[in-house]
Image (tube, rainbow, N blue to C red):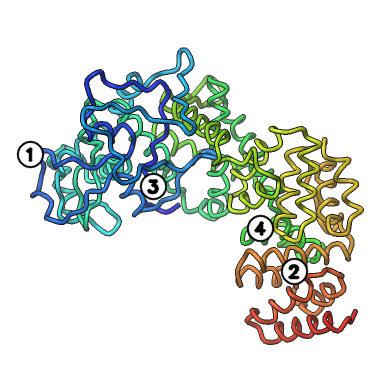
Amino acid sequence: MTSRNPRDRDAPLPSARRPERPATDLEADAAAGDGPPAPAAPGGRGSAAPPGSRGGGTPAAGRRAGATVTRLPGASAPRRRGPGAHPEPGRQTAPRRPGGRGRTPAPEGFPVPAELAPLARRMLADAVRIARWSGELQRVDKRGELLPEDARAAGRALAMTVGAAAKAWGQALLTGLVELRDGGSGPGWRLHAWDHDDEAVVRGWSALFDAWTLLAPVPPAALRGVFAVLAGQAVDQAPQLLSFLHLVDAPVPDGELMELLRRGLDERRHGAGAGLAALSPVPHAASAVSAVRGSEPDDEQQAGAPPAPSDVAAVLEWMLDGLTAVGAVVREPGEGEPSVRLSPLGHWAVRAKLEEICTVAQTAAGHIEQSALELLTACARYSPGPARAEYRAWVAARPVDRAVSELLEAARGDDALVRGLAFEALRVAGGTAEQAVRAAAEEPVLRPYALLWLAEQSDEGGVVPADVLSREDAAWLWVDTGAAVLDHGDTALLVGHVEAAAVGDPNRLFTRARQSGHPRAASVLTAVASTHPDPAVARAARRSAFSVHEGGA
C-alpha cells in the first residue's frame, strides 16, 4: 500500500438530524459532504493565502492524492452537485436518495451522529489541534506532509513529539481538517464545522476509516515477502470480516476470524487460479496455462499452494492493527484466546456502507434488472470481490433456472471474456446449476469451462486443470482465453499468456493451438507474432498462423 491520501468519501448517515435554525450555504454544503472551504480561522499560524489560491474541498484534495481505499463491494461513487446547485440562503435542504427516497432510519438502539461524534472528536483531538495551529502554510512537501521545521515547531507549540505531530497532521489531511492548496495548505471546511456539526465529524472519521491500511504498521522485514503476496488479497477480504463482526455484534475469537480470512483467500485462489492470475484479468486464463503446461514445473504447483497458517495469522494481525488504529475495532485479551469486536463507530461504518449497497442495487446504477450480457460486460471492469457481489444480487433477483439459462446463453456468444465471466457468475448458483452445466459440457464452445466448473463443484480441495481437461480441451481453452486477452488486455498480457504456457518450447504450444480447431486460433497466433519481443518466438507463431490459414493440421 502506498502512503497516499485517500479520497474523502462521505458515506450516508442513518437518522440524520438537521439544526432547527436555517442553514447557511456553507453548512448546507458541509452537510452534503461537498462543502467549500471557509476563510482561515483567526489567529492561525502563518499569513493569509495568496491571491489565486485554490480552495477546493476535501474531496478535491483527495482526488489529487488518489489513494486506494477500503470499500465494501458495490459501494457507489459519491454524488456531486453540478454548478449552480447550491441551496438558497435560509433554505434547508435534505439529502436525497435516487428515486426520491429519504434515508433509512437507524434501527432501534443504533447510535446516531450525536452519540458517535464525541467518540470521533476524542480520537481526532490532536488532528484538530494541529489543524488550528497551522492556519495557512505556504509550503508542505510533495506528499502533503509537514516540512521538518514545521513539524518541530508544531511539536514545541502543542507539546507533542515530532512523530506525534506528523501522525496528527496525516490524520488532519485524511479527514479534511486541512487541505492542500498550491504547494501549501490551509484549514478545511470540516475544521470550521467541527464543533457544531456532528454529521461532519462522523463523516470525517469515515475518511480515516477508509484509509486504515495507511495507518497499519509496516510489517517486520522478515515478513515483507509474505505481505507482498497476501496483503492486497487480504485487504479485499476486509469487508467480509467487518460485516461478520457487525452481524455477530459480540467479541469474536482471533482464531475464528483467521479461519474466515483463510477461506476467503482460498476462494480467491481457486477462483482466479495461480501464476498468470496475478497478471491477467481474464477468468480461466491461469487454468488454461496450467492445463497446457501439465504438472511439469514445481514452481507452478507452489504458486497455487495455500498460504501457511502462520502467514495468514501475520496478515490478520496487520489488518487488525490498522483497524484498531482508526478506532473501528476493539481488541480484547480474553481469558484464553484474544478476541475482536466492532466499536460503535465501526458498526456505523459497516452499516452505512451496507446501506449504500442496497441503495445502489435498487437503482439504475446496479445491474439487477439488466440482462446477463449487460451484467457480465459491466462486471468485466470490476475486481473479483465486487463482481461476485453483483453476481449474487443478480441471481437472487430471478428464478435460478432462468438465471442459469441466461448466463449460459451469454457464454455462447463471440466474446471470450464474457464466456469466462459467465462461468464465474455460475459459481454463485452452486449445485442448482449442475444439470444445465453438465448439458453445456456437450457443446465444444463451452466444454472446457463446464468441465472445470463441474470439477470444482465436486472437489473442495482444489482442482488441477491438467487432470480435468484433455489435451485438446486444454489447447482450446488456451486459445479462447488468449482471444479474451487479445480483445480486452494489452501486449504484456498476451506475451505473458504465451510465456507462462510455453515452458521453454513455444513451437509445441503453437502446434497445439493451431490444431485446436478454435476459430480465433489464427488471429491469436498472428497477434503473438506481431507483439512478442523474441524474434524466434514471433517467427514460430507466424508459421503456425500461416498454417492455420492454409488449413494445415
Q: Position of residue 516 (x, y in %)?
A: 86, 70
Using the rendered view, name the quadrant where residue 368 is placed. top right
Disc 4 marks which amino acid? Ala
Residue visible at 63% across and 58% down in the picture: 281
On the image, numbered disc 4 is attached to which residue? 277
Residue visible at 62% across and 41% down in the picture: 367
Residue visible at 60% across and 69% down in the picture: 490
Tell me, yes or no, if residue 331 can be seen here: no
Of callouts 4 and 3, which one flags the residue occurring earlier in the amino acid sequence?
3
Q: How many marks?
A: 4
On the image, numbered disc 3 is attached to which residue? 6
Compared with 391, 333 (above or below) is above
Asked if marks 1 and 3 touch (Cβ < 8 Å), the reply is no
In whole angstroms, how far apart are the C-alphas of marks 2 and 3? 38 Å
On the image, numbered disc 1 is attached to which residue? 43
Of callouts 2 and 1, which one flags the residue occurring earlier in the amino acid sequence?
1
Of callouts 1 and 3, which one flags the residue occurring earlier in the amino acid sequence?
3
Q: Secondary structure at mark 4?
A: helix
Please name whichever residue, 17 or 85, is drawn nearer the observer in this view of the structure: 85
Disc 2 marks which amino acid? Ala
Disc 1 marks which amino acid? Gly
In whole angstroms, how far apart are the C-alphas of marks 4 and 2? 13 Å
Of callouts 2 and 3, which one flags the residue occurring earlier in the amino acid sequence?
3
